[in-house]
Amino acid sequence: MMALYLIELGVEAADRPTVEAAIAEVSRQAAGAGGELIESQVTGDLSRVYVVVQADSCADLRLDASRLPGVAAVTGPDEVRLVGAALEDVVRARGAADYLVEWDIPEDLGMDDYLARKKARAPLYAQVPEVSFLRTYVREDTAKCLCFYDGPDESAVLRAREAVSTPVSRLFGLDHGLGQERGSGREAAEQEAADRGTTADQGTTDQGTAADRGTAR
């Protein structure tokens, strides 16, 4: 059964072309290993990229960092669990979100307790109606979780976190102009393979043409 994996990129050259190229390359490499990009999120300052990929195993997703120019650090892949949303809904919404909250989960809080805690406190979000909780990716080792929200501003998101009595380790506004739809990496990988095949066919044709010229002489 395919699982979800989180890959985090620290971008040294925080500009749009670099970020776009990094997302496309991660997606291409994942597709080449039989995986598929589910969503990507970029912080407002373009310094961090979060990519969620669906794949058969973690071993298949080891990235070739040399093909990620401008990326200073790669973390993961780490297996994650999607909580609070169905995967097909995330894909349909193309991963839209306004804010990302990271919480470094205490070591003594295991997955079962985390999920029970989250389920019990989720109704309290109603106290801050201007904020919508969208989804969470929690690492299977419960090292941390990523929670996505729609809301008018950071202070509203912080009020929502206070309502559910859940700490904030890091809070980022997300860039709405960057990201990639599901499947685009697979299409890129297939196109690259097709291009290689076309090049090989062209080389064969050229050789055949040269041979025909030699025969004509």
Image: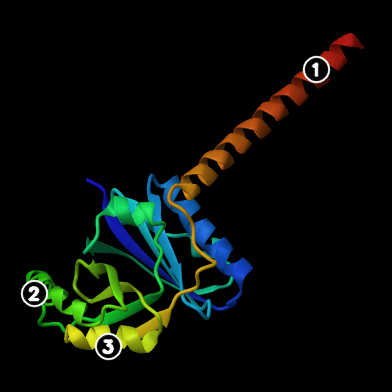
Which residue is the site of mark 1?
211
> Foreground residue, 94 or 180?
94
Q: Amino acid at mark 1?
A: Ala
Q: Amino acid at mark 3?
A: Arg
Q: Is residue 185 above or below residue 113?
A: above
Q: Residue furthest top?
A: 216
Mark toward the viewer: 1 or 2: 2
Callout 2 crowding tier (Cα within 10 Å): few <14, some 14–19, many ≥20: few
Which residue is the site of mark 2?
120
Q: Amino acid at mark 2?
A: Ala
Which residue is the site of mark 3?
159
In the rendered image, residue 205, in percent from the top left (x then y), is placed at 73, 22
Residue at left offset 58%, top offset 72%: 70
Q: Earlier in the sequence, mark 1 or mark 3?
A: 3
Which quadrant would the C terminus be assigned to in this image? top right
Residue at left offset 53%, top offset 64%: 22
Residue 143 at least partly seen: yes
In the rendered image, residue 25, in percent from the top left (x then y), is placed at 52, 57
Callout 1 crowding tier (Cα within 10 Å): few <14, some 14–19, many ≥20: few
